[in-house]
Image (cartoon, rainbow, N blue to C red):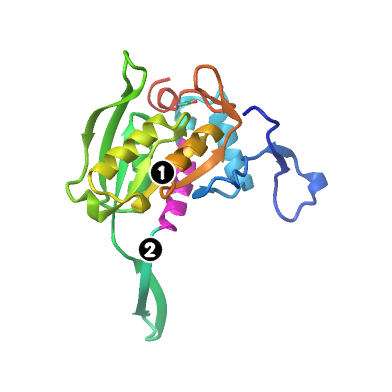
Amino acid sequence: GFDTPPSQCVGPEYRPATQKPTATVSKPLDQVPNIHILPQTPQLIALLTMIRAKETGRADFIFYSNRIIRLLVEEGLNHLPVVGHEITTPVGRTYAGVKFEGKICGVSIMRAGESMEQGLRDCCRSVRIGKILIQRDEETSQPKLFYDKLPEDIADRWVLLLDPMLATGGSALMAVEVLKSRGVPEEHILFLNLIASPEGAKRFAEQVPKVRVVTAFVDQGLDEKNYIVPGLGDFGDRFYTL
Ligand code: URA
């Protein structure tokens, strides 16, 4: 839908609203279950402003995208289960902490999703990463699986599925079906995404309601060519070529 996007005063806590600029923030999508939108902080809005601008060149696009991807990975990891873990500190006291329980892996949807692999590696040392290539079939114009390479024990892992743009949801839904066909339960899949369209997010949540989506922003809608608007253009082109 192309309804008026929400706007909000953005700036540091200590400033009164009258001294903050008004910026467009993410739609809330309260009615869609299992979608987690990053807090619309001044930092996040400033980073998104950089990568959305058409003048931003490749080096800056990569740098600022990587900062947002890092926020998505850190938030995504908060959705994984932990168990109690008591340790002893160098001064001989105990500390009641937690540690992650279970194995994880990343799965990137090629090509744009590969841009998110480094952010995942930066947070999870020596993480296994698989890949899925989905492209539109020329004849049917439906998404089609062209290639996949996934860890053989993927059914025993939590899967962080990586794709920066959720437009119609076609590729992401097909990727989830591939993961399910390899024995990964829907509830063990976390989809990390930079910008989602409201229609894509709703369709995704309807079809795979147990997959959690962590996104930085739900945008206004899709244009006639299925680009997200206002969006940032073609993510893969801006990250890899232009
Ligand atoms: N993929 C992109 O890279 N950009 C869009 O706007 C939609 C899908």
Q: Is residue 38 left or right of residue 106?
A: right
At horizontal 55% and vertical 48% (from top left) the residue drawn is 38
Residue annotated with mark 2: 81
At horizontal 40% and vertical 36% (from top left) the residue drawn is 163
In the image, 31 versus 5, the foreground residue is: 31
Question: Badge 2 local density, few (<14 within 10 Å), some, or many (20+)?
Answer: few
Q: Tag 1: residue type?
A: Val
In the image, 199 versus 241, the foreground residue is: 199
At horizontal 41% and vertical 22% (from top left) the residue drawn is 237
Query: Which quadrant holds residue 170?
Result: top left
157 in relation to 161, above or below: below
Residue 64 seen anywhere in this rendered image of the structure: no
Residue annotated with mark 1: 208
At horizontal 38% and vertical 25% (from top left) the residue drawn is 240
Q: Report helix, strand or loop for mark 2.
A: loop
Q: Tag 2: residue type?
A: Pro
